[in-house]
Amino acid sequence: MPKSRAHLRGHEPAVIAVAPIIKVAAVLFAAVVLIAAVLYLLLRFEVMPHQAQVAARQGAVPPAPRLQVHAPDDLRVLRLQKQSLLESYQWLDPAHTVARVPIERAMQIYAQQNAARSSASERR
């Protein structure tokens, strides 16, 4: 049966077309070899001659913020500062109209206000 009739009936040919596969593999192989050669030449003639100069440069001090030297101690100090904020009174504005109160006292005030609201709503 001719090849054209097999395609008309929906059948595939019985043989694999090896030539296109070999051409694609050859192109891929050539691309890999070309890329490897270009990278080798760049490293050999551009990067490596300047490596001694790069290694001899003094390192610049990075801009702030820098890495912490004693992170556990810094964390302990931060937690103490946050805890003192939660446990202290302080005016937050110059006119003395807004204040920070300790968290325990704030929870008591909130509970009293909600208890008064809930009892007033139950009476209605």
Image (spheres, rainbow, N blue to C red):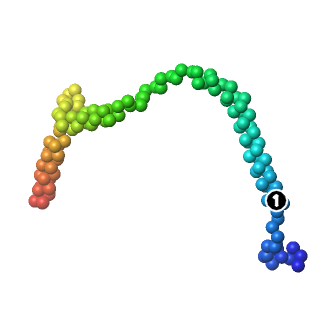
Of residue 122 and residue 40, the one placed in the foreground of this image is 40
Of residue 41 and residue 67, the one placed in the foreground of this image is 41
Residue 100 location in percent, x, y?
20, 36
Q: Residue at x 17, y 46 (%)?
A: 107
What is the quadrant of residue 105 in the picture? Answer: top left
Of residue 35 and residue 124, the one placed in the foreground of this image is 35
Q: Is residue 97 visible?
A: no
Q: Is residue 3 visible?
A: yes
Q: Dot 1: few (<14), some (14–19), or many (≥20) neighbours within 10 Å? A: few
Residue 103 location in percent, x, y?
19, 42
Residue 65 location in percent, x, y?
42, 29
Relative to 116, residue 122 above or below = below
The amino acid type, in three-letter code, at marker 1 is Pro
Residue 102 location in percent, x, y?
17, 39
* Quadrant assignment for the C terminus: bottom left
Q: Residue at x 23, y 29 (%)?
A: 93
* Quadrant assignment for the N terminus: bottom right
Q: Is residue 46 left or right of residue 65?
A: right
Residue at the far right in the pictured view: 2
What is the quadrant of residue 6 in the picture? Answer: bottom right
Q: Is residue 41 left or right of residue 110?
A: right
Q: Residue beneath label 1, please?
A: 20
Q: Residue at x 14, y 56 (%)?
A: 118
Q: Residue at x 70, y 29 (%)?
A: 46
